[in-house]
Amino acid sequence: MKYLVTGGAGFIGSNLVDAIIEKGHQAVCVDNESAESNSKFYWNEHSKNYPIDICDYDALKWVFRHEEPDVILHLAAEARIQPTIDAPQLACNVNFVGTCNVLQACREYNVERFVYSSTSSSYGCKNTPPLRENMVKDCLNPYSVSKAAGEDLCKVYYHIYGVETVILRYFNVYGNREPRKGHYAPVIGLFLRLKEEGKPMTIVGDGTQSRDFTHVSDVVNANILASTTQNSGAFGQVFNVGTGKSYTILEIAGMIGGDVEHIEDRKGEAKHTLADLTKSKEMFGYEPQKNLETYIQEKKNGSVL
């Protein structure tokens, strides 16, 4: 098959492109290199690469017309919570209008399968973990609002236009090539960088907030499963991609070891996340394989990238 991966030079996307090629498929990568927390971008030399913006519909259509992809894995987004609070219009344009552009290109060029990368942040504070896909949305920031709106677009494009959409809600992804730049990088990469620099790890608030941390290889596997499932009951549906286990930020700092510094609480973030994986396991066989504690220990020993 030929996969088109939007955001394919970034953290999760580049891991996906590598896996697709390793499995013997063709890969097309679209990325405009706009992610500010990425210290570098990863273009696979064996994929067809296009440095374009998904908000440029004419450029996007050109890629679809010339490459004729079979499956779209849509990861391109304004992907950090706090920066979208400062720039909500950019988040809505990229995450909603950009997603609509990619879906519409699928419709126009008869691409049957579209896998959407969404976020667990749409559960907010109203829901008590473990978090299930049928719980009410509680979007606390422009990022989760715009990503949740993209979920609704996916449902519309399936039910009205017949595009086989599958929606994946990621829970705090970490691992190879994770962003480490700036104050708003994901916490695992940020803490590891601060540790290497001999600086204290900056803990937001009291550090008792907890997260379900998911290794990027498990996210890659979920995308492959979603892109190949023959279970039509999965189309137009939302699925959690996590581990079913959570850790507090204080526990993460303790695993890494070193000095900590508490900073003020941030607006728009949930206190706790924890994925219920029942639906993902039953509908397309998702099973997380990676353990955070093992990863951090291996990282400290210098045995993983």
Image (spheres, rainbow, N blue to C red):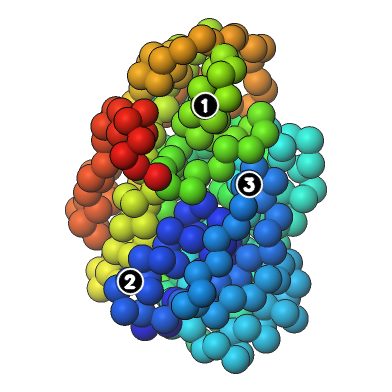
User: To which residue does mark 2 refer?
Assistant: 22
Residue count near mark 1 (Cα–Cα under 10 Å), binned few <14, some 14–19, many ≥20: few
User: To which residue does mark 1 refer?
Assistant: 196
Indicate left or right for 249 with 284 as reference.
Answer: right
Badge 2 marks a residue whose secondary structure is helix
Determine the residue positioned at 75% across, 81% down: 58
Q: At label 2, which amino acid type do we have?
A: Glu
Determine the residue positioned at 37% across, 57% down: 220
Residue 191 against residue 150 in the figure, above or below: above
Q: At label 1, which amino acid type do we have?
A: Glu
User: To which residue does mark 3 refer?
Assistant: 39
Residue 28 at x, y percent in the picture: 52, 77
Q: At label 3, which amino acid type do we have?
A: Ser
Residue 46 at x, y percent in the picture: 47, 77
Q: Is residue 82 visible?
A: yes
From the image, state whether disc 2 or disc 1 is nearer to you. Answer: 1
In space, the residues marked 3 and 2 are separated at their CA atoms by: 25 Å
Q: How many marks?
A: 3
* In front of the other: 279 or 205: 205
Determine the residue positioned at 55% across, 61% down: 42
Indicate left or right for 290 with 132 as reference.
Answer: left
Indicate left or right for 136 with 150 as reference.
Answer: left
Badge 1 marks a residue whose secondary structure is helix
